[in-house]
Image (cartoon, rainbow, N blue to C red):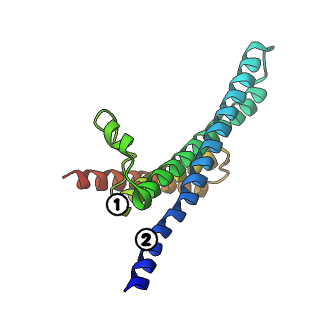
Amino acid sequence: MMVERLFEAALWRSRFIVILAVVSSLMSAVILFLTATADVIGIAVRSLGYALGPPHLSEEYEAFHSQIVGHIISSVDDYLLATVLLIFSLGLYELFISKIDVAQEDARHSSKILLIQNLDDLKDRLAKVVLMILIVTFFKNVIHTSFSDPLGILYLGIGILFVALALYFTGKSAHAGEK
């Protein structure tokens, strides 16, 4: 009986190993937020230099525009991934360690998106952000694709249809959960 009680106590306390994942995910989120922000600042500086510089040819403008849009989309992608890591970190902490009292108190005045009640909450929130990452990645790839035949344009249309359907069904499932 005593050995069983000691074993169960040790087993229960083993959940604190999740702290490693919480801290690592949080650090990764901070790194991505800082990296994406630095990239956006760099883009702003380059854009300012471009705008204040001498007039440019249309080919130069197209190349510059493509580069800027690519960087901005990549930054959005990084921000979304950082958000996934932040939600994951908070969710793991709430599920395995303890409820975050400050978040519970603050939820009365702000969004409840970061409050995780169970594993399904965590899964749903992560799935929605991951879907947004996939959509951003899809459009980033579309921007850098040139279509030389009608079949490529058809594939683009089908891809956009699938993205629209994914958003539609995600929104539909969110509204179904509210009822």
Decide if residue 157 is in sight here. Answer: no
Q: Nearer the viewer, residue 151 or 18?
A: 18
Mark positioned earlier in the residue sequence (1 or 2) = 2
Q: Which mark is residue 12?
A: 2
Q: What residue is at 18 percent from the left and 52 percent from the top?
A: 179
Position of 118 with respect to 156 (left or right) is left
Give the image location of residue 60, x and y in percent: 78, 28
Q: Which residue: 54% across, 64% down?
A: 17
Residue 43, visible in the rendered structure = yes
Residue 148: x percent and y percent?
68, 51
User: Residue 171, position in %: x, y?
Assistant: 33, 50
Above or below, 135 against 43 in this view is below
Total count of labels: 2
Name the foreground residue: 146 vs 104: 104
The residue located at (30%, 56%) in the rendering is 173
Q: Amino acid at mark 2?
A: Trp
Residue annotated with mark 1: 118
Tell me which amino acid carries mark 1.
Asn
> Height in image: 49 above or below 170?
above
The one nearer the camera, 27 or 170, is: 27
Label 1: few (<14), some (14–19) or many (≥20) C-alpha neighbours in 10 Å: few
Q: Is residue 52 above or below residue 66?
A: above
